[in-house]
Image (tube, helix red, strand yellow):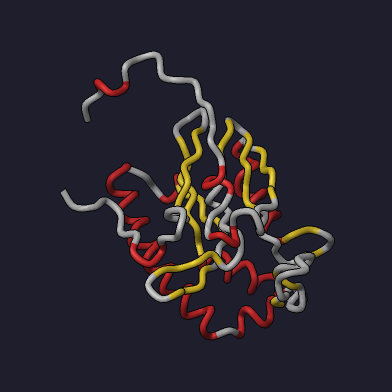
Amino acid sequence: MGPLLKLGSLCLGGGCPLSCSLPLCQGFRLLLASPSACLQLFHEKREEGHGEAAQFEGLKHKANRSINEMLADRRLRSDNLHAQKCIDWNREVLKRELGLTESDIVDIPQLFTLKGSYAEAFFPDMVNMVVLGKYLGIPKPYGPIIDGRCCLEERVRSLLEPLGLRCVFIDDFLSYHELLGEIHCGTNVRRKPFAFKWWHMEP
């Protein structure tokens, strides 16, 4: 049997930052990193007059990049068109194999940069989170600040909190992101085991 997903150039040092699943009272939601959603958000903010709002503002060791600069960066755009194609291919596989519809999938804004044969998250990869019941420990993206709030955090809250989840953004920039990992890569979670012998289960 061949591989289920084509990870290819989206693999990082700590694994693949492509997706995350969230258990809910009724089924689950699949989160997918989405360059298209991120670029669309930045276009919206530029149209609203916030083109000079900057990514990485507040990080002394990282150069700021304004929304205008990021949208004008042809290399960044090309890298993310490629990343989106890879993610879209996997999206269709996951829908087919897991019986999902588009309503089961949540697109989380994310950008990547290609580094040779693999990709790195341009800012902390928010789908690489840790799920603790209804609490989500999400890598802090350090997105453009608009009206005193990070527009990336606000978009993710608007997508996930209506599902009854609580988003907690955690600064992992130096501790994990710079080392090609995120929150999920650096945590171990003790979970209640199943009451049945799951290793006897057959598909």
Q: Is residue 140 above or below residue 129?
A: below
Residue 89 on image: x %, y %: 33, 62
Residue 153 on image: x %, y %: 69, 55
Residue 194 on image: x %, y %: 41, 19
Quadrant of the rendered image containing residue 143: bottom right
Q: Is residue 9 left or right of residue 140?
A: left
Q: How many numbered tags mark residues here?
A: 0
Q: Is residue 169 left or right of residue 60?
A: left
Residue at 84%, 60% in the rendered image: 148
Residue at 56%, 37% in the rendered image: 131
Residue at 45%, 51% in the rendered image: 19
Q: Is residue 177 above or below residue 170?
A: below
Furthest toward the left, the residue is 1
The quadrant of the image that shows the C terminus is: top left
Furthest toward the top, the residue is 195
Residue 180 on image: x %, y %: 53, 60
Relative to the observer, which residue lies in front, 191 or 165?
191
Residue at 64%, 71% in the rendered image: 42
Relative to the observer, which residue lies in front, 154 or 20?
20
